[in-house]
Amino acid sequence: MAGLGGPPGGAPDGAPGGGEDEYRSVVFDESFVRAARLQEFSAQERITDHAPAVRRRPPLRRAGLSRQALILVLLIAVAFGTAVYMGVRHPYQSPSGQRAAEPVRMTVVPLAPRERVPGAADAALLYAHSPAAHFRTAAQGVPLPGARRTAHFSEDQVFNALTTAKNYIVRSALDPEVLGGGEVRSVRVLLDPDQLHQFDESFERPAADGRHAPTGWLIRFDPARTELADPGIRVDGSLRVVESDSSTLEVSADHTMVYALRPADDARAEASLFTVRRELHFRFDRDDLRLHQTHLVASHVQAGPLSCADDSADHLRPLLAGQEAGAGVPAGTDPYTSGNATALCGSLAVDAQPKV
């Protein structure tokens, strides 16, 4: 006899405890039933519609984002974050600690002769009897020193700084078009864009204020009064480069240039020599090196023979052969020797003039 609650005749197939033990671990809870893809029609539905016994149910939509959507959102977020980081750390952007653009500090000191300016019909004779006799001609007098890498700049970057500084010197002091008082663009394109406003103002409204003198940017003569008697300008000097910090190279230039001049439109007039001692200080950041531009920091010029009473902000107006400065000449200053002049006007030393 079957036990209490057991089926008559005992468990089928002799299975102990009843045949349902085989499915005892399967739990058909509500979520399992709702997730089923097939659903049995009710008896009333089968009678009314003569439908099949079962129908297919649409899949349930899971709450929240699918795994694919979540991955897509994460990828977009990572890409956006990378773009922002690269924008902040772009290799061509200036470092956050870079100096702000500074106006050029410029000084132009006229050197007045104590005697009449010596002259000669032959400019080569004047050069041969002056301290410039051993100087090289034009750009040959601006040789480049050896370029060596620094702690934070490659050899090529150092070479670019030296080359750009030399180009500035050649274009601003040895180009006949610039010396004639007309061309300035060839010099302007070498400047850092932050300085172009000051450069343009200097030529639109020149002033001897230490900031806006055209003769602080370049050498040029009044074309109505003066012209070159010899295109072979004599030059001697040096360039020196240093790394001031991890993002900046600085180049110091110190050159003496000697011009043979004569009165404009008078080919038969005697020539005389005009000497310019010019010290320039350049600064380069990484953008400047890449674009072959520079930031001119300081310009110090001593030039003579000039009259102390002459305003040299716009053009240099040299005293020519046979002319003299007049009274009020201060103590002598020799542009062929090192050292900075401190006076607003100096005296051109006798030894600086040719002995003819």
Image (spheres, rainbow, N blue to C red):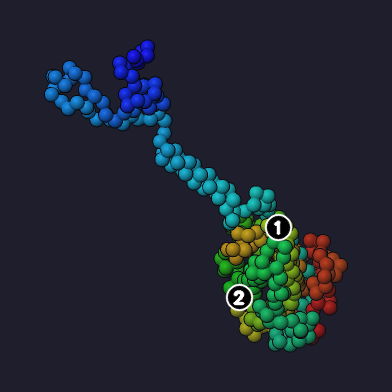
Numbered disc 1: secondary structure: loop
For the point 80% across and 74% down, the residue is 336
Residue 28: percent from the left, percent from the top?
36, 23
Q: Earlier in the sequence, mark 2 or mark 1?
A: 2
Within the image, what quadrant is residue 58 found in?
top left
Amino acid marked by disc 1: Ser
**Residue 104 or residue 241, whichever sits in front:** 241
Amino acid marked by disc 2: Pro
Q: Is residue 139 visible?
A: yes
Within the image, what quadrant is residue 202 found in?
bottom right
Q: Which residue is mark 2?
A: 176
The image's mark for residue 246 is 1
Q: CA distance from mark 2 to mark 1?
A: 38 Å
**Residue 328 or residue 172, whichever sits in front:** 172
Residue 273 lies, with reference to residue 41, above or below; the image says: below
**Residue 116 or residue 250, whichever sits in front:** 250
Within the image, what quadrant is residue 274 found in?
bottom right
Viewport quadrant of the N terminus: top left
Residue 182 lies, with reference to residue 228, above or below; the image says: above
Residue 138: percent from the left, percent from the top?
66, 79
Viewport quadrant of the C terminus: bottom right
For the point 61% across and 61% down, the residue is 288
The image's mark for residue 334 is none
Among all residues in the image, which is located at the extreme right?
331
